Image (cartoon, coloured by chain):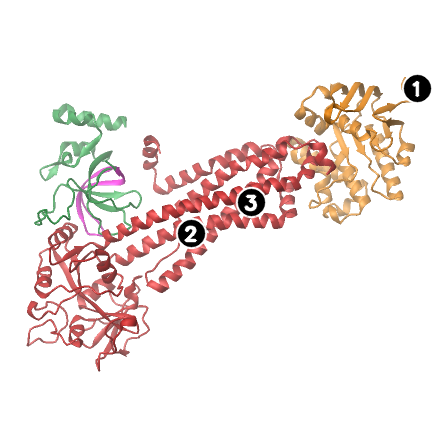
Amino acid sequence: MRRRQFLTLAPALIAAPVVLRAQDDTLKLRELYEGRDFSPLARDLEGTTIDVDGYMAPPLQADSSFFVLTKIPMSVCPFCETEAEWPDDIVAIYTRRKFDTVPFNRKIVVTGALALGSYRDPDTGFLSMVRLENARLRFG
Amino acid sequence: MPDPIADLLARLPLWMENTVILLGALLPVLVIGALVLRGFAIWPLLSALLRRQVWVSVVFTMLIAVSIGLGVGLIAQERGLRQGTARAADKFELVIAAPGSEITAMLAAVYLQPSAIPLIDGPTYAQVAAHPNADLVAPLAFGDSYENAPVVGSTPAFVDYLSEGLAEGRVFATETEAIAGARTPLAVGDSFTPQHGQGNEAEGAHGGFEYQVVGRMPLTGSPWDRAYIVPAESVWMVHGLANGHAPGWDGTVGGPFDPDYFPGTPAALVKADSLGGAYVMQAQFNTDRTMALFPGTVLSRLHALMGDIRQVMSILAIVTQVLVTVGVLAGLMMLTRLLARRLALLRALGAPRRFNFALTWSYAVTLIVLGAGLGLALGVLLTRAISGVITDRTDILVTASLGWSELHLVGAFVSLTALLALIPAWLTMTRPVVRDLRG
Amino acid sequence: MTGISLSISDLEVTGQGGRRILSVPRLEVPAGTAVAVRGPSGAGKSTLLYALAGIIAPSRGCITWGDTDIAGLDDSGRAAFRRGTVGFIFQEHLLFEELSALGNAGVTALYAPRRDRRRIRDSAEGLLTRFGLGKSAARRSDTFSGGERQRIAVVRALAGDAPVILADEPTASLDRANADALADDLMRLARDDGRTLVAVSHDPSLHDRADRVIDVRDGQLELPEAQNA
């Protein structure tokens, strides 16, 4: 906890806006990205345990320990646009234990160790840039 | 669990966390045991007690074992079912069918449960097949059967994808060839005639048409092990429909199909080029004409439901365990009356009160621990038997194994009941020595 | 080992409803004496014995063994006193049938301090041999005859090297020959080691062998003048 607070404060000295989130420990997905690249905050937090909130994309496999966290619900609503650009700012979540699927529109907070850099999942072939490993989730 | 402890545990490897939780669950009984038994050599009298009350001990132990076995079996069975059904659905990333019930479509496509579902037409199928994110698209033309086993029309590419290499033989190349699942009775070289429909609704053989088995799939642990896969063209043809190809077709089975000569398929399996591609296709083919579903997602909804049911039943199982334990402890209280004379004798000889307390408590805990251990074994055996029946009936490979949750449950049960066992132990200390001694 | 003396003064034991069961104004027993207590049934003999062992707490008075007034001890204090000082022999031997002869003879080792366990077991083994039961020490105790079982019970009382032996009708369940033999053994063992022995008994063979006989009647001791001096 201490360490995490320290690490969130350290970049705050450089990038003032980040100070705003020092109050609440939970990160937004977009705070990890800067365009298509990692944000300085993400680089600073690499390897530490962080909380990120978002939505669970419907998992393709039941009884697994992998899912994708998106910033907006991965809608299956017929009134939403269908061109469905696969969003760039997602986080691959590898859970500590097998998880129960959460409805796609229910906000969740994921706690896990932040890992950066490209990694191809051996089972699904999914290529991820940002991951939370050893993750646990709770409702936001 | 308070957050700091959860955070601390999350830093350990999973097995270590599980061990820590188990030890934590067992800690009360270990602490009580150490305190109660300190300085005594209890075993000779404890074993004498067990031998004297052998039938009572056996009955009490079995009662505990059965109640624990039910709880353990419930948890292990649910996990086995989850794993088995999930494994069977692994290959079915995305299924596209005509709009309707997702669960019906999933049961039909993944688990080959006979059901009447509408077809998707040629142009729609062509759209799916031509999607830039699609790696593999195959029709799943189910409906026919042979000796109650489903006969499903698809493509050679699907056979390759599902089997990851055949166990024997080769993939079908012509309309009269077929692939047999691992648990079918037919061998390579055997022939069979498909029937329209399945089970009691089968409407008689398709006159004169015969398939020859040219390959066998390895075990997949899914209902496909009991199925035959044939070229989709043949399924259409025996129903008197177009065969999916324009006139002048060279006879090579498999895609691409011509939309104008495509009679329709109840479902199509899609393997997307990437996870993102799967989500894109799923979003795009949820239209008024098609329904795109992730069997994994549908299944995990069913799993969640199953989990809820399991939780309710777990409460029943726990209530049973507590009732049995209370019954056993009540029995022990009566038993201590039978033992009163021997306990009084020990007191008269100068044994400390705590010695009798320790003797009675460890007697109860011995029954509890033996019962819990037997219960674990019983639960696993029970799960194994039930899993065998399920695998036999559904062809979904369900395996039974002992998991940490069961061990944690049993650990907590042992500790809780060891605490309760302090009550009859305490009661032995309050008995009148002289009166008990005179019997 | 040497026995310890007994001194009783102003002792009163009451039963349910405050009824007086036993009253002993004064009794002195020197260390190493073998005392036989006799009297009709219900006279209070067993009550006296249980009070001497601290199993029954008196309502008044002092029971002083050596320097310790056990009437002033609480329940666990009296149990500790029994552990260290008293070997008790019951009317019906009261063995744990499932244990061996040696297991029974050394049963007090199970709750004795760890350092004494070895000594108690060795002593039990030696005494069983002295009683002619050494070869069958490992046999289950319910396979022995009545006389043998009572001997095992005697060994149990002696194995802890207690300076005081209290016996409640030790020969009652035995035939004449066995009773005489046991009475001999008991007296010899008590005397050899200089223990103080109090035995409640109807059996004249025990009375004959005792240093002193006390009669109990209606909860009162009847002491000849000469002895009461």
- From the top left corner, tell me how far across and down residue A81 is, in percent: 8, 47
Label 1 is placed on what type of residue?
Answer: Glu
How far is disc 2 from disc 3 in space, using C-alphas?
Answer: 20 Å
In this view, B111 is above or below C42: below
What chain does badge 3 belong to?
B
- Choose the circle earlier in sequence order: 2 or 3: 2
In this view, B357 is above or below B137: above
Label 1: how many Cα within 10 Å (few below 14, some 14–19, many 20+): few
Q: Which residue is mark 1?
A: C225
The part of the chain drawn in magenta is A110-138
- From the top left corner, tell me how far across and down residue C170 is, in percent: 82, 37
Q: Which chain is orange in the rendering? A: C
Q: Secondary structure at mark 1?
A: loop
Q: Which residue is mark 3?
A: B367
Label 3 is placed on what type of residue?
Answer: Leu
Label 2: how many Cα within 10 Å (few below 14, some 14–19, many 20+): many
Q: Quadrant of the C terminus of chain B?
A: top right
Contact between labelled residues 1 and 2, with CB atoms less than 8 Å apart: no
Q: Is residue A118 magenta?
A: yes
Q: Which residue is mark 2?
A: B73
Q: Is residue C176 left or right of residue A11?
A: right
- From the top left corner, tell me how far across and down residue C62 is, in percent: 76, 18
What chain does badge 1 belong to?
C
What chain does badge 2 belong to?
B
Who is closer to the viewer here, B226 or A96? B226
Q: Which chain is red in the rendering? A: B
Q: Outermost residue toward the front?
A: C17
Q: Secondary structure at mark 3?
A: helix
In this view, A90 is above or below B138: above
Name the dominant secondary structure of the magenta segment: strand
Q: Quadrant of the N terminus of chain B?
A: top left
